[in-house]
Image: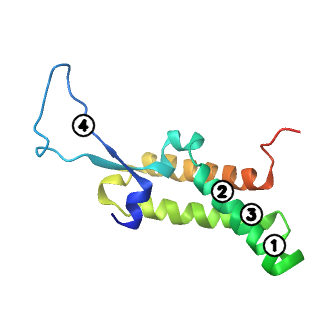
Amino acid sequence: MGWSDLFLAKRQPKLAKAETIAASQSPPTAVGVFITPQSLVSFPVASALVAIIWALGQKLFGAGAQTPWVPLLIAVLLGAVIFISNVSAEDARPKSLGGWLVAVGIAILNSLLLAASALGILGTK
């Protein structure tokens, strides 16, 4: 299991009702989990990573790391790493320009949500 396997979900081929195929016949295709609509609600580990890295930066660097721009930068960098990891698998890459635009848009939204989570913007008051 490689690094990118942590961020890829295997998609099984769709079958007609009562249709069967041999397990060795068609391997599942990979889909990047950070660039799918489902990822908008399922990334607690990445959110925790941004918060932990920011808290560590505040302890190590003091006031310089307390600006709200720091978690945004951390979230964008983490989002970029996950995005690149997702699209590095040949079968997980978007196949069209529209697919790429949607994937990049969702990755940007996810990065912003990671930053918002670390900043406590999404919390109740």
Which of the marked residues, 2 or 3, is nearer the chain's N terminus? 2
Which of the marked residues, 2 or 1, is nearer the chain's N terminus? 2
Disc 2 marks a residue whose amino acid type is Ala
Q: Single out the mark in the foreground, 3 or 1.
A: 1
Q: Is residue 6 left or right of residue 48?
A: left
Disc 1 marks a residue whose amino acid type is Gln
Could you say whether the residue bearing mark 4 is in a helix, strand or loop? loop
| Residue sitting at the far top | 17
- Which residue corresponds to mark 3? 71
Percent position of residue 32, x then y: 42, 52
Which of the marked residues, 1 or 4, is nearer the chain's N terminus? 4
Q: Quadrant of residue 51?
A: bottom right
Could you say whether the residue bearing mark 2 is in a helix, strand or loop? helix
Could you say whether the residue bearing mark 1 is in a helix, strand or loop? helix
Q: Is residue 20 left or right of residue 31?
A: left
Which residue is painted at 61% across and 53% down in the image?
A: 108
Query: How would you rate the neighbour count of disc 3 (Cα within 10 Å): few for under 14, some for 14-19, many for 20 or more?
Result: many
- Which residue corresponds to mark 2? 48
Which residue is painted at 20% across and 23% down in the image?
A: 16
- Which residue corresponds to mark 1? 58
Which residue is painted at 30% across and 54% down in the image?
A: 91
Query: How would you rate the neighbour count of disc 1 (Cα within 10 Å): few for under 14, some for 14-19, many for 20 or more?
Result: some
Task: State the separation of the CA atoms marked 2 and 3.
Answer: 11 Å
Task: State the separation of the CA atoms marked 2 and 1.
Answer: 15 Å
Q: Is residue 51 left or right of residue 35?
A: right
Which residue is painted at 83% across and 38% down in the image?
A: 124
- Which residue corresponds to mark 4? 13
Q: Quadrant of the N terminus?
A: bottom left
Front in this rendered view, residue 17 or 91: 17
Q: Quadrant of the C terminus?
A: top right
